[in-house]
Image (cartoon, rainbow, N blue to C red):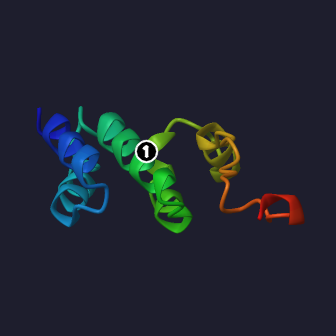
Amino acid sequence: MAVAWYRQSLDARVHHEGARAGLVALLGVAGCEASASETLAVAYRANDEWPLLLEIVEHRAPRRPTRRARLRSCWRPRRSRVTARTIPRGPSDS
């Protein structure tokens, strides 16, 4: 139940410190670890916070035999974030 409330807080404000701290605390609670780590992973990916994502790898794939296997199981390719701002304007775009 607590994970759902924290998820709602992060949906409203992805940098919500209280929600993030609460979810980190729930990583050590049996039965909450998987949903808390997935919720944190979504928030960290949305903000390109890769070092923080790496900190929770152990919680996201605890049954994998090696750290490399855990990292591989958590990796998901992302779509490129190409926007009009990242594409250089040419002479015909003036």
Q: Residue at x 53, y 67 (%)?
A: 51
Q: Residue at x 64, y 43 (%)?
A: 75
- What quarter of the picture does the N terminus occupy? top left
| x then y, percent, for residue 30 | 23, 37
In this rendered view, identify the residue nearer to me: 76 or 73: 76
SS at badge 1: helix
- Name the side, left or right, on which 30 lies relative to 2: right
| x then y, percent, for residue 45 | 51, 52
Give the residue at mark 1.
42
| x then y, percent, for residue 54 | 53, 59
Location of residue 21 with respect to 35 vertically, above or below = below
The residue positioned farthest toward the right in the image shown: 91
Number of disc labels: 1
- What quarter of the picture does the C terminus occupy? bottom right
In this rendered view, identify the residue nearer to me: 94 or 60: 94
| x then y, percent, for residue 14 | 31, 55
Q: Residue at x 40, y 39 (%)?
A: 38
- Name the side, left or right, on which 84 lies relative to 91: left
Q: Residue at x 80, y 65 (%)?
A: 88
How many residues crowd mark 1 within 10 Å: few (<14), some (14–19), many (20+)?
some
- Name the side, left or right, on which 1 lies relative to 29: left
Indicate the amino acid at tag 1.
Val
Which quadrant of the structure image shows residue 21? bottom left
